[in-house]
Amino acid sequence: MPGGRLVGIDRDGEALEIAKERLRRFGETNVLLVQGNFGELKAIFEKSNIERADGFLFDLGVSSMQFDKAERGFSFRYDAPLDMRMDKGAELTAEEMVNRYPEADLSRIIYEYGEERFSRRIAKAIVERREEDRIDTTAKLVDVIMRAVPYKGKHGRVHPATRTFQALRIAVNDELNVLGKALDDAIGLLSPSGAICVISYHSLEDRIVKNKFREAKANKILNILYKKPLTPEEGEIGENPRSRSAKLRAARRV
Ligand SMILES: C[S@@+](CC[C@H](N)C(=O)[O-])C[C@H]1O[C@@H](n2cnc3c(N)ncnc32)[C@H](O)[C@@H]1O
């Protein structure tokens, strides 16, 4: 938009470096890139002297860059240190979580954030293994999971480590707690008629977005633009298989 201004926020400094290169041609006055957390949107706006936004686009979750960089520790497909932090300056890593958290907490995290039905077995196996050997790599964690999951859990469509890795990543980055706050802030900062669009990648996130939008509609703050979330068509999924789970919800400020 001519004369418009874009504020790009990511907690991952590496993502911002890439964005900076890509958006260089738009000049520094039109593009402001901030390393920060969506949960601190209001503070970020205040610090940058921005009062309102005409639109918000949230693209949630983990990026392909983060997944595909083995050393970030997000993927069970590569052997790497068990890290999973989106912000490399954050204190808590997946390694800390897996080696320190009580069994009951691990079990709850894996169940709630991974929707993993073998969460108790996996948490128990983690605690047993860490007493002998620190679980400090993705490969060690995959090994623990593979041994803990019974035969029927190993022959489904998804890799047996998928859900546990998703759960730990969500917990390490506190993704779900931050999201509610981020949406509240964004709705509060939106100009009249401004749009808010959110792309989420799993049902736990989508539920939070759906409920926040409904609440704002009931309070006559937002009009919801699509009753059902938009999802990619087959062609897009063919070109970009990772779009498979994406759901876009959009609303407009009254
Ligand atoms: C699906 S990726 C999208 C990245 C970007 N749109 C792109 O196409 O490359 C999600 C990005 O959001 C960032 N992110 C996730 N949760 C965040 C949060 N609470 N605060 C700030 N950034 C977050 C991640 O670090 C990641 O880079």
Image (cartoon, rainbow, N blue to C red):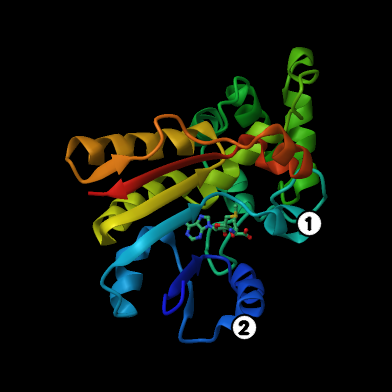
Which corner quadrant of the figure contains ligand 1? bottom right
Residue 25's tag is 2
> Residue 17's x, y, as percent?
63, 76
- Tell me what residue is drawn at x 66 percent, y 75 percent: 22
In what element is the residue under mark 2? Answer: helix
Tell me the crowding category of disc 2: few under 14, some 14 to 19, or many 20 or more residues within 10 angstroms, Cα based.
few
Picture residue at 58% right of the left edge, 66% below the top: 12
Q: Is residue 182 visible?
A: no
Q: Nearer the viewer, residue 102 or 15?
A: 15
Q: Which type of secondary structure does the marked residue at label 1 adopt?
A: helix
Image quarter of residue 116: top right
Percent coordinates x, y for residue 28 in the rendering: 51, 86
Drawn side of residue 250 relative to residue 213, left or right: right
Query: What percent of the width, then of the height, locates residue 221?
Result: 21, 46
Name which quarter of the figure residue 68 lies in. Answer: bottom right
Label 2 beta carbon within 8 A of ligand 1: no
**What's under tag 2, amino acid-wise?**
Arg
Task: Please give the count of numbered marks on the rendered protein.
Answer: 2
Q: Is residue 22 above or below residue 113?
A: below
In the image, taking residue 208 as reference, residue 240 lies left or right, namely: right
Residue furthest front as drawn: 2
Residue on which disc 1 sits: 70
* Neighbours of disc 1 within 10 Å: few (<14), some (14-19), many (20+): some
Q: Is residue 149 above or below residue 23?
A: above
Would you say 97 lies left or right of 133 here?
left
What number is the disc on residue 6?
A: none
Quick check: 110 above or below 82?
above
Disc 2 from disc 1: Cα separation:
31 Å
